[in-house]
Image (spheres, rainbow, N blue to C red):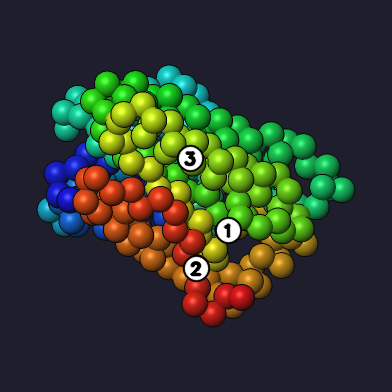
Amino acid sequence: MIKDKVVIITGASSGIGEATAKLLASKGAKVVLGARRADKLKRIVDEIANDGGQAAYKELDVTKQPDNDAIVELARKTFGRVDVMFLNAGLMPISPLSALKTDDWHQMVDVNVKGVLNGVAAVLPEFLALKSGHIIATSSVAGLKAYPNGAVYGGTKWFVRDFMEVLRMESAMEGTNIRTATIYPAAINTELLETISDEGTAAAMQNTYDKYGISPDRIAHVVAFAIDAPEDTTINEFTVGPANQP
Ligand code: NDP
């Protein structure tokens, strides 16, 4: 059931996070949006409210543990509890390793890896105590297959895959009904390519997305499907992309 579930979404100011917030709210979820650009979050929350949905937002930098704790606290204060944590914030400043864009490497590790750890640390104690809850993370097809220029990005998304699988196993071994889902999107038209600073890589990726990219709404439907599954059922992994992308 989606209706009345309290869902925190990180990276909710654009793309997949925004589309998911809107779709879940339209299905009766109470959504709590986090990202760094508070002005964008406010606009989205206003749109959701105008459409009759329930939403709140908080400025969030997933690399900071106190920010993650604060958005969980906001969800509790506003809606009484947290049912689902959607760990979706991410960056993709990909480039050849030879370009030595070490700042980009570290940023991807900080947001895509440590951001996920911080989000899990913020909700896991309560989920373990309740023996329930749902943690959903956005990995990437780059977390399933190696791509040139994507060594660090792919590495962060492989991490998400491994981490989420162990989280699933340990949650079950500890006798909880905590559910997990990991999503592996292919080319989805969002603001993600704007994070690429290497010109050659950016142009090549833009060509691919111009040819194949599909709406982030497609991923939102998959998140909704995972949440809507019976409470005793984990729908664990989804690979989702354009039908015509090889
Ligand atoms: P967008 O760039 O549209 O969205 C990324 C979101 O992450 C934004 O809301 C951004 O908000 C947020 N974000 C970035 N850094 C931080 C931070 N430090 N703290 C909090 N939020 C942050 O791209 P997508 O919607 O495509 O990306 C969502 C996820 O999907 C990412 O994890 C990405 O890796 C993954 N993905 C996307 C694919 C695609 O083709 N689009 C393919 C495979 C995976 P703000 O800048 O306001 O903080």
Label 3 near label 2: C-beta < 8 Å? Answer: no
Whole-percent x and y of residue 21? Answer: 30, 50
Residue located beneath label 1 in the image: 141
Mark 1, Cα crowd under 10 Å, few <14 / some 14-19 / many 20+, is: many
**In the rendered image, which quarter is residue 144 located in?**
bottom right
Disc 1 C-beta below 8 A from ligand 1: yes
Whole-percent x and y of residue 30? Answer: 20, 43
Label 1 near label 2: C-beta < 8 Å? Answer: yes
Residue located beneath label 2 in the image: 241
Q: Please state which amino acid type lies under the numbered disc 2.
A: Gly
Q: Tell me the tag on residue 109.
A: none
Label 1 residue SS: helix
Q: Tell me the tag on residue 164.
A: 3
In the image, 8 versus 180, the foreground residue is 180
Q: Earlier in the sequence, mark 2 or mark 3?
A: 3
Label 3 residue SS: helix
Cα gap from disc 2 to disc 1, whole angstroms: 9 Å
Residue that appears at 43% across and 24% down: 121
Disc 3 C-beta below 8 A from ligand 1: no
In the image, 182 versus 10, the foreground residue is 182
Task: Inspect this view and state whether residue 171 appears.
Answer: yes
Whole-percent x and y of residue 206? Answer: 64, 67
